[in-house]
Amino acid sequence: MLAFAVALAGLGILMLRSAETFASVLPLSLVLSLAFSSTMPLADSMIAQMAVHYRVDYGKLRVWGSLSFALVSIVCGALWKRFGFGAMFPVAAVIFVFVLFVIRFLEEPVTGEQQARPSLRILALDRGLMALFAANFLIGVGEGLYITFSGVYMDQLGGSKLLVGGLFGLSALCELPTMALSGAPARRIGKPVVLGASYAIMGIAFLGYAIARTPEILLLFGMLKGVGYGFYFSMTISLANERAPAAWTSTVQSLLMGLGLGLAPLLTLPLAGWLSDVLGMARIFGVAGVVELLAVLVLGWAWVRREFDEFPLNCL
């Protein structure tokens, strides 16, 4: 299934090269959404299970994805500035061919055919997991605004294509230390606390976006956002995987991604686009910062009520 979704994503990106109108881009965007909604949960759940099996912190594995993202963003920002965006699509499609090769080495977690699969409704019994779903939806609002409007905002402030690439690339570079080292603070103070701190860092970064008036200042707050995201991504995946029943890990990851990267942007991005036209793009990043800090309250309330101390469902 993962290989099929990756192949579909590569084909969709390649076809985007010839799409020049909204009517032609829209169906390809739907295809890409379908593909990526499957790739991330399937890959993350398998990799998180492999991390447990081989006794490696998930963040130390995920850090390589951030490293490649950072290097490609910065290097390609310079290349597209010189050669234009046209080459981006076939190059990305070729890279997906290499991804298909790597997928062969992933290991699917073995749960045992004789083991009865518990009802999906059992997930609702874990209030900590439900709080994680709700908080991740709020984080998805900010992430949707960041992914959609950051490059446009950098361009509005006078940044070049190199700085647009640098905004994402340097942010990803700043993820590396926090993602790689996230296991140590998680063992010391707990994953929910580290996750809540990541929400706060990203919220402050988005509020910084709202007051930025030069490309250089925006770049600095983008790097701060990367620091928070490094903790956020590794803690979200590992905490969800830790609490979900083994038979439902991919489903839980899909629900998290669906809420954060699917439903949240679907509900908020059209309104955000309108607000950007009316009030300016800085205001929508201010809203994103407030929403991210609201996620801190949601997760913090669950932590204060000791919802994450309950017996995890994966032990049932």
Image: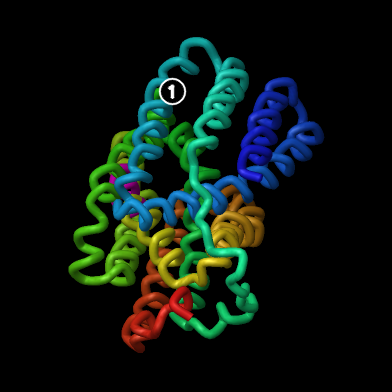
Residue 183 placed where, x, y %? Answer: 25, 58
Which quadrant of the figure contains the N terminus? top right
Amino acid at dot 1: Gly
Can residue 243 be seen at all in this image of the molecule? yes
Q: Quadrant of residue 185?
A: bottom left
**Nearer to the camera, 58 or 50:** 50
Residue 29 placed where, x, y %? Answer: 70, 39
Residue 298 placed where, x, y %? Answer: 42, 77
Residue 285 lies left or right of residue 1; in this view the side is: left
**Which is the main secondary structure of the residues drawn in magenta?**
helix
Q: Residue at x 43, y 30 (%)?
A: 164
Q: Quadrant of residue 240?
A: bottom left
**Nearer to the camera, 220 or 7:** 7
Q: Name the residue tied to disc 1.
A: 77
The colour scheme of the drawn protein is rainbow
Q: Residue at x 26, y 50 (%)?
A: 178
Vertical placement of residue 90 versus 235, above or below: above
Outermost residue, right side: 23
Q: How many tags in the picture?
A: 1
Residue 17 on the magenta span: no
Q: Residues within 10 Å of mark 1 (few under 14, many from 20)?
A: many
Q: Which residues are magenta?
A: 222-229
Q: Residue at x 61, y 24 (%)?
A: 93
Q: Residue at x 51, y 71 (%)?
A: 245
Q: Quadrant of residue 2?
A: top right
